[in-house]
């Protein structure tokens, strides 16, 4: 039996953007931290949603009328997103700082001396990988959570105002958080420093705003990365509209990547 093979394109030795994409994809999927971080993010997103909605469903008959009136079925559904964003953001830092810690970045920049295409390849590959995993994860968490709450007749439907946007937005939110982490890691070029900077901006800075006068806090806090980005997950009103808040988070991610690109061009590897 004759086995047919596809003709192979001649190797020209040129470094193209497509080849950089393939190279970064090989790096990303061959590192254990990638698999573990994405697995943890998936488990947090889906598992905690199931646990939180099960607890709510169990306690629903004993909840006060005030607690019931202030309840929205999407809130426990997105409980896992709060932890998943930490795994996704830390992995974003590691995507770039891992190469600096091992010295592999020198080989990458030797192969692609223009430098910036390497950064864009990392951002695109990691962003698409995160998007491809976290959007389905958000929908799985939604369907599991709402099926549990439906036993009490308190579930939310995709056709309800803002629900589809919030579920899809959860995946988008986690993707941009990952790119924000990647940008910060590229700026700092150190794993510990990048993770500390990411955690500080996302989780430490918001509580610190409480020491400011109330009017200052109310004016600034809605524009911080965490509060602004999470608006796309919410169905209630706020200072920023849901997509406007998500746009602010995208602005932080773009700013981090732009600063990283400028520094990458100016600094030695």
Image (spheres, rainbow, N blue to C red):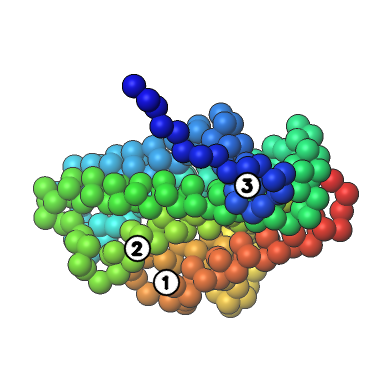
Tell me which corner region of the image, top left, top right, bottom left or bottom right, holds residue 256. bottom right
Distance of label 3 from label 1 (alpha carbons): 37 Å
Residue drawn at the location 44% of the way across and 67% of the way down: 231
Q: Which residue is mark 3?
A: 19
Mark in the foreground, 3 or 1: 3
Q: Going by the picture, which residue comes out furthest to the top?
A: 1
Q: Quadrant of the N terminus?
A: top left
Given residues 242 and 16, the one toward you in this image is: 16
N-terminal-most mark, 3 or 1: 3
Which numbered dot is residue 165?
A: none
* Horizontal relation, residue 129 to residue 184: left or right: left
Given residues 172 and 107, the one toward you in this image is: 107
Mark in the foreground, 3 or 2: 3
Point out residue 138 in the picture as x, y percentages from the top left corner.
Answer: 35, 51
Which numbered dot is residue 166?
A: 2
Q: Which residue is mark 1?
A: 242
Residue drawn at the location 35% of the way across and 63% of the way down: 166
Q: Secondary structure at mark 1?
A: helix
Given residues 261 and 116, the one toward you in this image is: 116
Distance of label 1 from label 2 (alpha carbons): 9 Å
Does any portion of residue 189 appear in the rendered image?
no
């Amino acid at each position: 039996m004759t086995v047919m093979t596809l003709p192979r394109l001649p190797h020209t030795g040129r470094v193209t953007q497509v080849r950089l994409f393939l190279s970064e994809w090989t790096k990303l999927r061959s590192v254990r931290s990638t698999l573990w971080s994405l697995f943890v993010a998936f488990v947090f997103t889906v598992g905690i949603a199931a646990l939180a909605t099960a607890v709510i469903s169990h306690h629903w008959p004993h909840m006060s009328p005030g607690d019931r009136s202030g309840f929205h079925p999407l809130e426990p559904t997105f409980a896992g997103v709060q932890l998943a964003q930490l795994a996704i953001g830390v992995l974003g830092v590691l995507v770039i700082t891992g190469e600096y810690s091992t010295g592999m970045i020198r080989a990458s920049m030797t192969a692609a001396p223009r430098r910036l295409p390497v950064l864009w390849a990392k951002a695109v590959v990691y962003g698409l990988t995160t998007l491809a995993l976290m959007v389905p994860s958000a929908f799985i968490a939604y369907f599991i959570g709402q099926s549990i709450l439906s036993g009490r007749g308190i579930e939310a439907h995709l056709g309800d105002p803002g629900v589809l946007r919030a579920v899809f937005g959860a995946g988008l939110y986690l993707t941009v958080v990952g790119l924000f982490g990647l940008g910060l890691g590229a700026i700092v070029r150190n794993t510990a420093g990048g993770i500390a900077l990411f955690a500080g901006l996302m989780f430490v800075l918001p509580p610190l705003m409480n020491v400011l006068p109330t009017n200052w806090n109310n004016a600034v806090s809605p524009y911080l990365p965490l509060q602004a980005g999470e608006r796309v997950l919410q169905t209630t009103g706020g200072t920023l509209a849901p997509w406007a808040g998500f746009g602010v988070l995208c602005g932080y991610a773009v700013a981090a990547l732009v600063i990283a690109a400028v520094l990458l061009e100016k600094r030695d590897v």
